[in-house]
Amino acid sequence: MKRLWIIVTTVVVLAALGAGIGWYLGVDRLETVRGVVGSEKAPFFADQRVKDAFASHGLRVETDSRGSREMATTVPLDRYDFAFPGSAQAAQRVAQARAATGRFTPFWSPLAVATFTPVADLLAAEGVARRAPEGHWVLDLGKYLDLAKRDVRWDQLKGNVAYPARRDVLVTTTHPGDSNSAGVYAWLALQQLGGGANALDEVVKLFTDQGGLERSTEDPFEKYLAQGLNYTPLVLVYEAQYVDAGRAGTLPANATLLYLSPTTPSAHTVVAFDGAGDEVGRLIANDPELLRLAAEHGFRTADEAATASVLAQVPAGGAALPTKLADIVPAPAPEVVDSLLTTLDQRLRP
């Protein structure tokens, strides 16, 4: 009995010793790199396969999530090795807030509106939404803005049994001063309305009429997933968020996606502040495994075949999501967006 106890004790000690050695040689030897990322990319960095891919290069990447535009204003960037906002414009502001050692643009994602098929059908009856020739849904931004300008309510739409609420027909967004998605949406709306003081007033109204505004794109999208129509019928999102949720099986019943027309690409850009941040940016932009995983999380990479394969697996109102988008306008210059958002911030946070 005593001999058996000695054997068991020896095995346990050796196992613990082996585990400790393995931990020391593996995890403890990784270089920790810290980044602040747009919330829409949080699921990508949380994926264990992504963590393993970085670990194979000797890195442990830890991230905090913030609104893309918030990064350049209230985030203490000196705590991080890199920032990863949702557009080149937001990246430019980040680089102005802290000197960058490099920039990398590994993938992009268009803005879209997460909704429900009965709501899309209702908007189609009003001429605001339509099916593209390929089958996916499109939101006519000009016609939608006309509804918003006239303060049309959901319960005023003819034959509305899908969402007969006494609320204005509005897309739920984040705050344009904090979040890239809302900032790009504001710029697209301003262009569609023709620019000028009157158009700016209408853009301000798109946000003030919503009431309280979230700071990060992930916040309203999570409520859309959890509460469905009980939250709101139209939510501004990145396509990647919807695709990621579709592949995870967490979309609400009758979920579908409306693509803005016109729209502009949002190039998610890594801004590195030091050598470790540079290495993360290079890996995300060039490592085949990380690029494959980015596509799985819904981001569009240079590999169009990988993107098409992922999009084909996502439910969206009975039609495949488009591999190519029409009616794309060039992204605005950073200084143009900065000027608009400075004005909006003054109006929305007096």
Image (cartoon, rainbow, N blue to C red):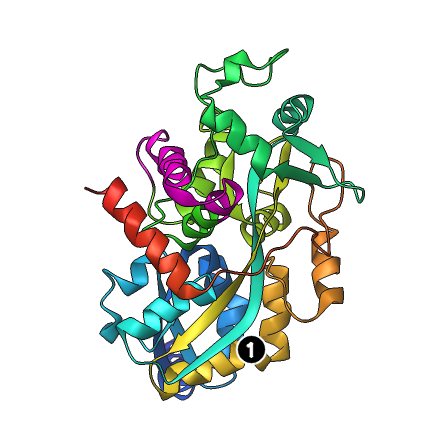
What SS does tag 1 mark? helix
The quadrant the N terminus occupies is bottom left
Query: Residue 4: in sight, yes or no?
Result: no
Q: Is 275 on the left or on the right of 227, as rendered?
A: left
What residue is shown with label 1? 285
- At 40% from the left and 68% from the top, the residue drawn is 91
Displayed quadrant of residue 273? bottom left
Q: Main secondary structure of the magenta part?
A: helix
Point out the residue furthest to the right here: 133
> Residue 116 colored magenta?
no
**Residue furthest toward the left?**
350
Q: Position of residue 225 (x, y in %)?
A: 50, 38
Say which amino acid is labelled 1: Ala
Q: Residues within 10 Å of mark 1 (few under 14, many from 20)?
A: many
Where is residue 8 shown, x and y percent of the image? Answer: 41, 77
Residue 193 visible here:
yes
The segment highlighted magenta reads 188-213
Quadrant holding the C terminus: top left
